[in-house]
Structures are given as C-alpha cells and as structure tokens.
Image (tube, rainbow, N blue to C red):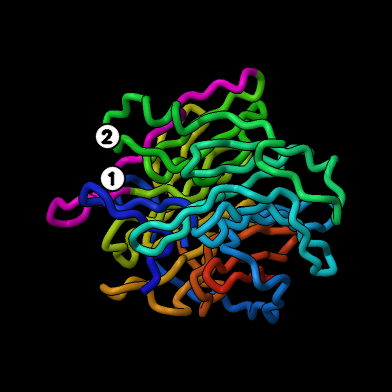
Amino acid sequence: MRYTGLLLQNSYVWLIGLATVVLGLAGGCQSILTDHRVPSAITQVAAGLAGPLGLEADSQGQLWVTEAGSGTANDGQLSLITPQGTVYPVVKGFSSSISPEGAVFGLNHILLQGTTLWLLHGVEGRIYQLDISTVKPGNPPLTPDDLMYQDIGAFVRTYPFQNDTNASDVFNLTAGPDGDLFIVDAAANAIIRRNAGTGAFSVFATIPPIIQSGGDTLEAVPTGITFDGQKFLVSNFSGYPYPTGKATIYQYDRTGVESVFQTGLTTLTDIELDVNQQPVVVEYGTWNGQGFDDRSGRVVRSTATANSVLLSGLNFPNSIKRVGQSTYYIAQTFDGTIQKVSL
C-alpha cells in the first residue's frame, strides 16, 4: 500500500514531507478532456534517487533536486543533475524519518530566486537558503549546518488560526510581488508570506476545508503554488478518503482574496505554468479504498473552462517543472526517478 507521505491525525489527513469543496464559488468547470497533441516520448533523466521531490532548473540547464532520504537515517540531500545526467550531492545530512504508515518525511520543495535556492523542510519547519553561485559540481558536499535558515514552523504553530490544526508542514513556495516568498503549509492549510526585505513572516491567506455533500468536510491540503504576475494559483490534494474529482485549483489576488479557478481534479501534488500562463498540474493517483492505484497519475492542463489530460500512466508523480517552451521534468518519488517529456 502506498501511503505517500500522508499523515493521519485527529480524524483528518494532510500531506507531509515526502508527499509520496468544491466551494460553490464562481468559476470552475469539471469537464475532463483529452488534449489532441501527442506528447513526445518520456526520457529518463536520473534514477536511483532517494525520494526525489523538489525540482528546479538553472540557466545552465542543470536540475536541482531534493531527496527526502530513506527515513532511517539523516540521509536527505540536495542534488545537482548536469545536462549529461550526472548526479552530484550538493548538501548531505538532512534529517529523514519515517511514519508508522510507512511515509518518509524530509525535504520538500525548492525555489530558485536569482542565485538563491530556497529549500523547505516540513518536519524541521525550516526554510534554508543556498547561494548556488558558490557550488561547483564535484566539490565536497556541504552539510545543513553550512546553510542559513529560518524557523518558519514555529511561526505557523503559534499563529492563532480560526481553523487551527496545531501543526505545520511547509511544503511548497513561489516568488510573488516585491520578491516576497509565498509558502503553502500543507498541515496548517495556509499561505505564509516571507518579506524579502526583513525576512518577517505573516499569514497571507487560509484555505478552507472542502465541503462534501452531506456536510462532511475534508482538509484542503495545499500542495503547490505559483504566481502568474496577477494572481496566485494553488493546488490541493484533498484529505482522506481522497475523493476523485474533488481537488481544486484556487486563485488568490494580491490581497489574499480567494476564488476558484478550476475544479474536478484529483489528488493534486504540484502546479506549474505553461508558456501561455495556464496552470499545468500533477495528479498523484486514484484512491481505491485501500491504497493508490499504480500508474494512475496524470498531468493535466487547466483553463478557466476545462481540464485537459496531457499525460497519463504516471507512477505516483509528486512534482513538475517546466523548462523552455514545452519541456517538463517530473519527479516520481517511489520510483526514484526524474523524467523529461515535451507537452
């Protein structure tokens, strides 16, 4: 059974670590279409990684990848993959632990802002930073103690949310207005803003529970965030029992006012913008009541009017990164692989 980094607690589920409602507001169409374009063949870029999750790319065509580790030792790491496919460890020794459900908790997503690489560690509640201009492939790896960090988890856990989960899992991030960072917390169901000038944290927005027919509620579990220059788009996984078609892409204006961009999606784990500024999302898989079905993951493009399936048959995809016009890199955590495809 694949638990995919899902932590059960207090009768709800949130996405944590290795990752593994429809609100009745205006907007959103639940139709699922198939894109008529045929994706190019999938190419494997790297294999044998220990729980790859966060993906970034730099101007030299190098990929930066977080590996959550084994869960049995402090073997989480940040790795660099050259255009030739050689994998180099950059920072080694991040904490990695395993839950009773078998989920590995460690490093989450990353963001490259100029030459600063930001790394989120949900269990530690830290946001690390690394100047990649100082990194040369093949140099001895650094340790987490060599990096500057802030304790964002402490801020989240002590903040008096209206729907307080008393927990934090800083999971994904993007850059927004004025260079501030906007960070989704998958346990607190909130978007945290980090001021670029002062480093201070504030709550930008909260994400309400998913209301199901009959009155049952699910935690939203935000997993991805991106900014198109005007609005933020946020993907969500949706809590147990991970219903098909109930995951939503929310949108937030610059003041944090929420609306719905699109609905009808399933177990979203990441979001990226295509060359036309339309969201492309990753669906982790379909829950069958006992676990997630193998190779039920998909890549879907959403517009304001429809969802179009671009790629199916993926095996528990957790993150996606666009490079150039139409090249996408996809991390499949349990397979330990990074794949490349043109969509």
* Highlighted range, magenta: 198-219
Q: Residue at label 1?
A: 209
Q: Kindly check if marks 2 and 1 are in contact, taking CB atoms under 8 A apart as contact.
A: yes
What element does badge 2 sit on?
loop
Q: Is residue 218 magenta?
A: yes
The foreground one among 49 and 316 is 49
Residue visible at 61% across and 57% down in the picture: 67
Mark 1, residues whose alpha carbon is within 10 Å: few (<14), some, or many (≥20)?
some
Mark 2, residues whose alpha carbon is within 10 Å: few (<14), some, or many (≥20)?
few
The N terminus sits in image quarter: bottom left
Horizontal arrangement in the rendering, residue 320 relative to residue 237 (left or right): right
Q: Is residue 275 above or below residue 166?
A: below
Residue 147 picture location, percent across and down: 69, 35
Residue 8 picture location, percent across and down: 29, 54
Residue visible at 52% across and 30% down in the picture: 151
Query: CA gap, disc 2 to disc 1?
Result: 9 Å
Residue 141 picture location, percent across and down: 77, 49
Task: Name the N-terminal-most of marks 2 and 1.
Answer: 2
The C terminus sits in image quarter: bottom right
Q: Residue at label 2?
A: 163
Horizontal arrangement in the rendering, residue 138 relative to residue 33 (left or right): right
Q: Is residue 102 magenta?
A: no
